[in-house]
Image (cartoon, rainbow, N blue to C red):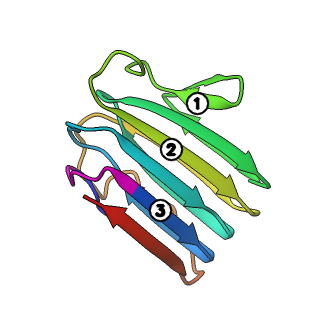
Amino acid sequence: MHLRDVPLTRLNLSIGAGQVDVDLTGDRKTDLTADIEGGVGQANIRLPKNVGVIVHASGGIGSIDSHGLKHEDDSYRNDAYGKTPATIRLKVEGGSAKLYLARSSRTPARRGFELASNLPVCYGLTAVV
């Protein structure tokens, strides 16, 4: 899901099984609140480097791999958190999913999503612009 530079304010994503790639990079003028519910599989979430990001992950998530984010208490934050006019607040609740959080500045949307999966993707999406 290539949501780079899409002016979303709210995102609800439910993943059943398989792999999903979500690109939330780009310049954000307003806050984004995103809730992702994982099932079985893998969620790859690309986050901006120059917009404040805080991620709360809970539930039965199998593993969390966070590149460029600091783990503090029960959250993951980037260096820009609390320093930018817009903030991405991401809440991830999982089943037995693997979660990959990757910080990005201005890389192409597909780059970094080379993790292969042969599982079909099943998800629901609600987005508010």
Tell me the residue that label 2 is attached to. 90
Q: Is residue 75 visible?
A: yes
Give the residue type at disc 3: Asn
Badge 1 element: strand
Mark 3 Cα-neighbour bin, 10 Å: few <14, some 14–19, many ≥20: some
Q: Is residue 116 visible?
A: no
Q: Residue at x 70, y 58 (%)?
A: 94
Q: Where does the image place residue 95, in percent across and percent down from the top left?
A: 75, 63
Tell me the residue that label 3 is attached to. 12
Q: Report, in whole angstroms, how far the alpha carbon at label 3 lies from the one at label 1.
A: 19 Å
Question: In the picture shown, does residue 24 fall above or below 12?
Answer: above
Q: Is residue 22 magenta?
A: no
Question: In the picture shown, does residue 14 fall above or below 4?
Answer: below
Give the residue type at disc 2: Leu
Q: Quadrant of residue 41?
A: bottom right
Which mark is on residue 76?
Answer: 1
Q: Residue at x 29, y 62 (%)?
A: 2
